[in-house]
Amino acid sequence: MDSRGFSAGVKAGSSIAIGYFPIALTFGLLAKTTGLSLIEATAMSIFVFAGAAQYISLSLIAAGVAPILIVLNTFVVNIRHFLMTAALNEKMQPDARWKKALYAFGITDESFSVLATQQGGRLKTSFAAGVILISYSSWVVFTAVGHMIGANLPQFLQASMSIALYAMFVGLLVPSMRRNRKVVSLAAIAGLTHAFFYFTEWLSTGWAILVATLASAVFVELISPKERKS
């Protein structure tokens, strides 16, 4: 591997690693309060490595949702990764498929942004490896640290941390709603759809979230072109 390219990638990805510090720490802490062991929480970060999907999984685990529905919800939330890795493939140097598979696994919104905005022709695999390794390591390590911190908190604080999960979702959603009216429609339709299934008890929690997510996304995309033409 090109050590120069790898070092440059680590340097470029260091800002992502710093940014992941509080988010991964919080995830580890919330995983502890949700009931996951240190090994389970760390393994989720090792094998899933998807911030939003992992937070959603915690809420579904807390609600006692079936594992298959957690997997399906994670898949839906991360569908965008197919598009990101396909777009990035056009920018990367030709290389073995197993190498492409490795760095494709490590692509997140943040690492994609860093890699996609690099100038100067095709990107080296070593550079992508550096960006992804430093960010991936930060996420996994601070997940474990957060869990260990959570284990040492008083029991009443561990119980109260469950509200932080919902606060974080709100914190992620509100800034997007302020910048984009489509996000407002998407959030409102998804919320109403989920509420309908929840209160009528037609679907379980996991299926209700899955159906609400897909239905709202499809509906908003269908009505958006009409809005642009008017």
Image (tube, rainbow, N blue to C red):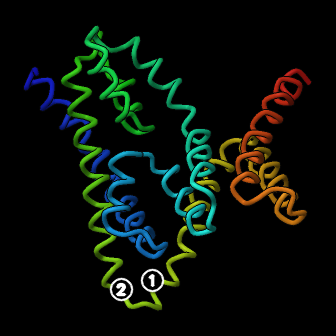
In the rendering, which numbered label is found on residue 158? 1
| x, y percent for residue 111 | 36, 35
Q: Position of residue 26 (x, y in %)?
A: 40, 66
* Left/right of residue 147 with respect to residue 77 in the rendered view: left
Residue placed at 51% from the left, 58% from the top?
A: 55
Counting residues from the N terminus, which is met first, the one under dot 2 or under dot 1? 2
Report x, y in % for residue 183.
Answer: 71, 44
Few, some or many residues within 10 Å of mark 2 (<14, 14–19, 20+):
few
Task: Name the image quarter holding the C terminus.
Answer: top right
Q: Residue furthest left?
A: 3
Residues marked 2 and 1 touching at CB (< 8 Å): yes
Residue at coordinates 31% horizontally, 63% vertically from top-left?
Answer: 39
Image position of 88 (left or right of 139): right
Along the viewing direction, whichever of 3 and 32 lies nearer the viewer: 32
Residue 22: which quarter of the image? bottom left
Q: Relative to 150, is 208 above or below?
A: above
Q: Which mark is residue 176?
A: none
